[in-house]
Image (cartoon, rainbow, N blue to C red):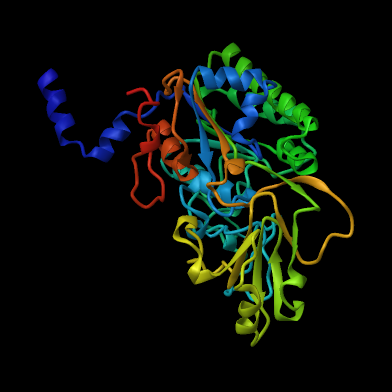
Amino acid sequence: MARLLILLLALLTPAALVQARAAPPDRVVILISLDGFRADYLDKGVTPNLAELAKGGVNAAMRPSFPSKTFPNHWTLVTGMVPDHHGIVANRMEDPARPGELFTMASDDPFWWNTAEPIWAMAERAGIRTATMFWPGSDVGWGGTRSRPAAMTSGGERPSDWQEYNQAITNRQRIDAVLDWMRRPAAIRPRLVTLYFDTIDTAGHEFGPDDPRIEPALTEADARIGELVQGLRDMAIPADLVIVADHGMAATSSERVIALDRLADPALYRVIEQGSYAALVPTEGNEERLWKALSASGPNHTCWRKDQIPARLHYGASPRVPPIICLARSGWTITATAPDRAFVGGAHGYAPEDPAMAALFIGNGPSFVPGVHLAPFDNTAITPLLRHLLGLPPVDSLDGTIKPFAGGLRQ
């Protein structure tokens, strides 16, 4: 029997070997996003449950992809591709294939999302049941079309269970929904779950990352994570928790503003997005005039034509990236006009290497080695990690690999 087993293993390909080491059928993987949780928020001392999970598992400061905005980075986390490759290049964008249309964070047309396959579709195709308690893009029928919604077709275009995003649903209600899924019989219990909290990001924008008034949001989210951990423990369900953030947060102020209309005549351009960076489309026939006005970058911002964006940002190849991008220095804001009132707050979208943009990463559960602190890594590694935890074979088509987690995963 032993010789037969050795022979069978020798015939397996590397991908098949990964499949053979699939996670136990009762183990679940829960991907949790704490939107806007800056990596060093963990040092504030107000998140004891997260601190305990970090101490008993693997933790790191994670670099977001550019632009360090919510939708581009949430789609990177579940596709393993940078925004330039997966197509969600901004929270607001246009596509030459759809003149006159604008993508916003409310857009659910599959056209915008179909460039890259999300992890729940990968898992469903492999026969792994999935569920999403919110995640940007999870209520969109991946692979569908406007005339043939994927929700009405067979296959793995949507998770087996999913909830349409509603900010009025509290964090406690979100946790309760996940625990209800876990109470199901094993045959219909999801093995991959996503969970999304937005309250920390909201507080960060309102108060800024250094204001003590952000701490109640941190404490509340931490308490809900504690309830999830206790609920899983009470049900004796082994779970690998992958806790992430999409980006960090930088302090902003009306004293640090760059007004576009003071750099160039507004008749020369349209503003697609503004804030930490500005995405600009020249009006017809005015590209050279606009570039001449913007090319002399100031001390607190830099402008590029899309084919000149630095390689380190991995941005500019997608047709959805507009002709000109102006990136502000951390903590500065680019606006169409100067603000008419004083403000302080927080923003993100800055360069991935900016320490203020560093995002939380914690891995805790049976698959993780306790007490490991990893070097900072790019968030394109999360999808390869999820594939590994689910027992799916590695693929070469992703921008990230599992290499950053060497030493942090049990063999």
166 lies above or below 366? below
Q: Measured from the top left, where is residue 151 in percent x and y?
A: 60, 52
Tell me the residue at 71%/44% (across/down): 165
Does residue 402 appear to the left or right of 58 in the view shown?
Answer: left
Using the rendered image of the protein, determine whether residue 183 is visible from the camera's viewpoint: no
Tell me the residue at 45%/18% (across/down): 370
The one of 175 and 81 positioned closer to us in this rendering: 81
Q: Quadrant of the N terminus?
A: top left
Q: Measured from the top left, where is residue 307 in percent x and y?
A: 49, 71
Using the rendered image of the protein, determine whether residue 11 is visible from the camera's viewpoint: yes
Q: Measured from the top left, where is residue 282 in percent x and y?
A: 65, 78
Looking at the image, the residue that sits furthest to the left is: 3
175 lies above or below 249? above
Tell me the residue at 64%/88% (across/down): 285
Looking at the image, the residue that sits furthest to the front is: 299
The one of 47 and 20 positioned closer to us in this rendering: 47
The one of 85 and 15 positioned closer to us in this rendering: 85
Does residue 323 appear to the left or right of 1 in the view shown?
Answer: right
Q: Measured from the top left, where is residue 225 in percent x and y?
A: 65, 23
Could you tell me how many numbered marks the image carries? Answer: 0
Tell me the residue at 73%/68% (across/down): 260
* The quadrant where residue 47 appears: top right
Q: Quadrant of the C terminus?
A: top left
